[in-house]
Amino acid sequence: MKILFIGSRLYDDIDWYVKEKGIESVLTESNEEAINLDLPDQVFIVPRGMDGPKQVALMQKVDAIVPLIGIDPPLIDVAHMKEEVERDFRIPVIAADVRAVELTSNKINTKEFYTEIGVTTPEYQILNSPDELTLDFPVVLKQGEGQGGKDIKIAKSIEDVEEYFNQFSQALCEEFIEGSEISIEVLGYGGEYVALPPIYKGETTIEGTHPLNKVKTGPCMVEGLDNNLVQHTAYKVAKNLDSDGIFEMDFMYSKQKDQLYAIEVNTRPNGTRYLTTATCGINSLCELVNMAIGEFSLADISDRLEYHYSTEIPVGNYGGPSPKEPVKSFAYNDFVVHGPEGYQRVTARANSKKDLENLVEKLM
Ligand SMILES: Nc1ncnc2c1ncn2[C@@H]1O[C@H](COP(=O)(O)OP(=O)(O)O)[C@@H](O)[C@H]1O
Ligand SMILES: [Mg+2]
């Protein structure tokens, strides 16, 4: 088995698994200064875009292509490449197709899609000027595209909305949901989908603090919220997206209204994955590899499901005890350190809440 991986930045997360599986690894990267270029068997530096990876895949006669791209902008090019390469060369590309990317990479399209398939999403309107606003304050103003909280503002007054329009000419304006933020990963391949355990990412704040900067825990334990409902809703969204790979979804739960709201979908490796792996033992990036080698199976995932308490803490720069090799694997560690210097996070797991507290104390 020979796999082409596109993008080196996340490759250290799965290098150990690729080696364990005896897979021959080829990697393309557009930045020759990028990290992890020493890990794969072969590396090709190619221009940005999907033409280079496609040529390398054909020249190297790989069995499958696994894009490891953690940001939104390239996903549409990947999706077009997937459709072409699967159709013309019969090489599987483990990624979302064009329709799924178009529906999920733009938050406005995603809202319309939720409404079409009968999934509740916060009330919204598309504003072309502040005076069109009819929702009650506070409201959340967003752009169609963006991640990590980029271009998001919580407006408490019409002045805030006017200020936002100094910078933008249109806004997706959403009812502010007071409640819990929840993320969940769904894995899909060949028409089969599995929703992994949901993760709790903290409460929404009127300042709009992004979950990237909060302490998160798994499994999700929110009073009044049934995790089966989250998993079932996520499954329904993924099934209707009808594509391959990872679907990470954000939800919010308002206890006051006893309502689960769907917020957004990311069809790529995402920040929830460490907590998912810590909590249930399933690693979404390893599953992309399994999809590529024909070993992805729902029965197998059910057999491997584990039950742990886990937490993820932003630490900036980690200075605690060293993890064992391979350092990115929960198969060998009860904690994993990840993220770039200055923005590192530690994800830790244990079999009871008390053990988890003790472990965190040891690591901090
Ligand atoms: N309707 C809302 N009500 C309350 N908080 C929100 C709402 N929408 C977004 N937020 C806050 O902003 C964050 C980022 O919003 P999101 O739509 O997930 O965009 P991004 O792609 O930047 O993650 C959310 O995680 C949440 O903290
Ligand atoms: Mg989000």
Image (cartoon, rainbow, N blue to C red):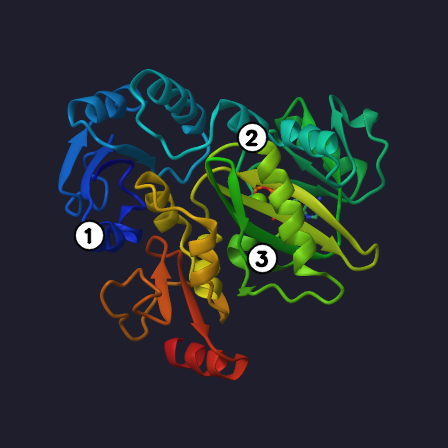
Mark nearest the camera among 1 and 2 is: 1
Query: At x 66% / y 41%, what residue is drawn?
Result: 153
Q: Which amino acid does label 1 sit on?
A: Lys
- Residue 129 versus residue 263: which sits nearer the camera? 263
Tell me the quarter of the image containing the C terminus: bottom left
- The label number, if any, that marks residue 19 in the structure image: 1
Q: Position of residue 351 (x, y in %)?
A: 48, 78
User: Is residue 92 visible to us here?
Assistant: yes
Q: What residue type is labelled 2?
A: Glu
Query: At x 45% / y 24%, what residue is drawn?
Result: 76
Indicate the secondary structure of the residue bearing disc 3: loop
Q: Name the residue under label 2.
A: 145
Mark 1 or mark 2, earlier in chain: 1
Q: Position of residue 210 (x, y in %)?
A: 57, 51
Q: For marks 3 and 1, give the CA distance.
A: 29 Å
Left or right: where 101 falls relative to 136: left
* Image quadrant, ligand 1: top right
Mark 3 or mark 1, earlier in chain: 1
User: Is residue 148 visible to us here?
Assistant: no
Judge the density around disc 2: few (<14), some (14-19), many (≥20) Cα neighbours within 10 Å.
Answer: some
Indicate the secondary structure of the residue bearing disc 2: loop
Q: Is mark 3 within 8 Å of ligand 2?
A: no
